Image (cartoon, grey):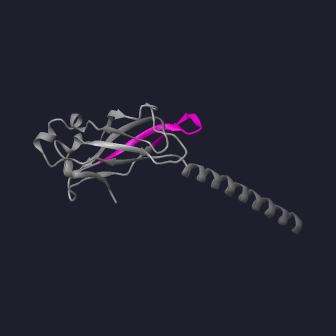
C-alpha cells in the first residue's frame, strides 16, 4: 500500500512539473509578443487634441501586422464627458508596409477628439489639462495571422510642466 501511495505522489509531481513547464513556456511566448509604444509630439499651436502622436514597434523580431489604432478619451476630471473611442486619423506608416510596422519602424497618427467633444472645447479651454487618453491597438498575432491581439497603452495626460507641453504617459 505504501508503494502505491509513493507512485501516486510521483505521478502527481510529474504532472505538476509538466503543467509548470507548459505554463512557463506560454508565459514566455506571451511576453515576447510585440507591443506598440506611443509618444506625443510637442503641442506648439492650436488645440492639444490636434497633436500628432508617434507609434513605434520596438520589438527586434516581430512585425505589427494589420495594425489598427483607436484613440480613447478615458476621462475628463470635473466633467460629465463620457468615455469616447474614436478611430485614429492621418495614420502614416512607412511606404514599404502600409498596414503595419516592421521591427524598429515608427509611424504617426492623430486623434480626432475635437469632433467628439464638439462644443465643449470652445466653452472650456482647460478641458485638455483635465483629460486622460490612451490608445487601443489591434494587430495580428505574429506567426498566426488568423488571431488578433488587442493592447491598451498606458494612460496619457497633458504635461504642461515641460516646454513646449506634450502628452506624457502617467507614471
* Viewer-proximal residue among 129 and 12: 129
Which quarter of the rendered picture does the N terminus lie within?
bottom right
Tell which residue pokes out farthest to the bottom in this image: 2
Does the rendering let one see residue 1? no
For the point 72% across and 59% down, the residue is: 17
Q: In this view, does 142 lie to the left or right of 108?
A: right
Can I make out residue 25 in this image?
yes
Total tally of numbered discs in the picture: 0
- Residue 133 image point, x, y percent: 30, 47
* Image quadrant in which you'd find residue 138: top left
Residue nearer the viewer, 107 or 137: 107
Quadrant where the C terminus sits is bottom left
- Looking at this view, is 99 or 169 the one in front? 99
Task: Indicate left or right for 149 with 156 as reference.
Answer: right
Residue 70, given in percent of the width and then of the height, sits at 36, 38
Q: Main structural element of the magenta stretch: helix, strand or loop?
A: strand
Which range is magenta? Answer: 133-150
In the image, residue 136 lies in the stretch drawn in magenta = yes
Residue 115 magenta-highlighted: no
Q: Where is residue 61 shown, x and y percent of the image?
A: 55, 45
Q: Position of residue 57 (x, y in %)?
A: 45, 45
Of residues 111 and 42, the one drawn nearer to the viewer in this rendering: 42
In the rendered structure, the answer to whether residue 116 lies left or right of residue 37 reads left
Amino acid at each position: 500500500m505504501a508503494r502505491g501511495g509513493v507512485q501516486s505522489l510521483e505521478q502527481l509531481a510529474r504532472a505538476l512539473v509538466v503543467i509548470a513547464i507548459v505554463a512557463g513556456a506560454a508565459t514566455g511566448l506571451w511576453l515576447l509578443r510585440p507591443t506598440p509604444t506611443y509618444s506625443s509630439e510637442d503641442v506648439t499651436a492650436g488645440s492639444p487634441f490636434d497633436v500628432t502622436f508617434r507609434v513605434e514597434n520596438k520589438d527586434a523580431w516581430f512585425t505589427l501586422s494589420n495594425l489598427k489604432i483607436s484613440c480613447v478619451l478615458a476621462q475628463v476630471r470635473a466633467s460629465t464627458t463620457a468615455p469616447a473611442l474614436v478611430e485614429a486619423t492621418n495614420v502614416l506608416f512607412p511606404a514599404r508596409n502600409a498596414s503595419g510596422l516592421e521591427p524598429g519602424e515608427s509611424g504617426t497618427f492623430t486623434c480626432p477628439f475635437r469632433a467628439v467633444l464638439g462644443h465643449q472645447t470652445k466653452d472650456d479651454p482647460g478641458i485638455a489639462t483635465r483629460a486622460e487618453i490612451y490608445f487601443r491597438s489591434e494587430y495580428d498575432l505574429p506567426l498566426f495571422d488568423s488571431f488578433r491581439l488587442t493592447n491598451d497603452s498606458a494612460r496619457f495626460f497633458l504635461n504642461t510642466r515641460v516646454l513646449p507641453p506634450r502628452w506624457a504617459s502617467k507614471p
